[in-house]
Image: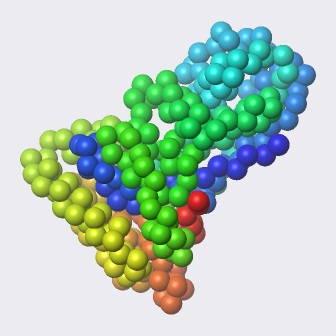
Amino acid sequence: MIVKTPSKVILFGEHAVVYGYRAISMAIDLTSTVEIKENSDKIILNLNDLNKSLKLNLKDLKEIEPNNFGDFKYCLCAIKETMDYLNIEPKKGFELNISSNIPISCGLGSSASITIGTIKAIGKFYNKPLKDDEIAKLGFSVEKKIQGKASVTDTSTITYKGILEIKNNKFRKIREDFEEFLKSCKFLIVYVEKRKKKTAELVNEVAKIENKDEIFKEIDKVIENALKTYNKEEFGKCMAKNHDLLKKLNISTPKIDKVVDIGNKLGFGAKLTGAGGGGCVIILVNEEKEKELLKELNKENVKIFECKMVY
Ligand code: PMV
């Protein structure tokens, strides 16, 4: 049994969302894959990309503390939470093979993707498939247990797919007609550089900016306009405008700005996505200039991923 799970990007409103303004997130087709198969009395976890394996006795599962298991912590916590929720007495063991083409630690929700994939796989394996609402709740609870603090952005976007508006840690699906428009858009996710700071550090630095509220209000206006346009050129301009405002929050870097400039020149528009301090840029592709865009990006020693919205 194989479960494929998307990842996510923040299209607009990162950081503003911490202060009760909205952010817009979108599920994308960079995916993680969880394969589950029967194994008599053991739980075997294989993280194929990291070349790491873990073997546990089924009967020990109840006692373990996932946070002590390094790279396996999300997956183990997802297994425990799901089995508890479904009241499954662990009698039948399993092997989970996990792989992913989602760049890690750069705001694309790679751990949320694996968490949601594991929850779904466990439900299916024990013949108790879960509803989206249950999956999203379990996913959020796993992120909270592992990270201490979590936002619904990653787990909800990855569970419900399409595009969501996030506000005050609640979410709603964006109108179907707007989803239709986004279906026709092709994006590039460009992994530019390793993040120099963690999300929490960047959030703390933004907190010290005096005129941040003015900037967030501007970002909110950009979002209002972006959601009214069904035109790629206009939508790209909104992305560029959001990036300019993020620059005022000091979370961009020279390398990120350079890639954004290329995206604005040879695509419809670009911005950094996520907390900043490095990480990824999202570019809305203008197919007429795509070859030139790729040529310029390739000079920058970056990793390029083509992606589309998943719905
Ligand atoms: O950690 P990331 O890159 O997924 O970004 C989080 C987005 C922020 O708005 C900066 C923080 C948050 O909790 O919403």
Furthest residue in direction bottom, as rendered: 288
Instruction: Name the residue at 73% across, 42% down.
Output: 34
Instruction: Name the residue at 34% across, 53% down.
Output: 23
Instruction: Name the residue at 37% across, 48% down.
Output: 166
Q: Quadrant of residue 52?
A: top right
Q: Quadrant of residue 130?
A: top right
Front residue of this view, candidates 31 and 159: 159
Q: Is residue 77 in view from this perspective?
A: yes
Q: Position of residue 254 (x, y in %)?
A: 30, 64
Quadrant where the image shows the N terminus: top right
Front residue of this view, candidates 180 and 292: 180
Instruction: Name the residue at 30% across, 47% down.
Output: 17
Q: Is residue 128 above or below residue 59?
A: below
Q: Position of residue 135 (x, y in %)?
A: 60, 36
Front residue of this view, candidates 124 and 178: 178
Quadrant where the image shows the C terminus: bottom right
Q: Position of residue 200 (x, y in %)?
A: 33, 37
How many numbered circles does the render carry? 0
Furthest residue in direction front, as rendered: 176
Q: Is residue 265 above or below residue 2?
A: below
Furthest residue in direction right, as rendered: 40
Q: Is residue 302 in view from this perspective?
A: no
Front residue of this view, candidates 262 and 81: 81
Q: Position of residue 276 (x, y in %)?
A: 34, 53
Q: Is residue 206 left or right of residue 84?
A: left
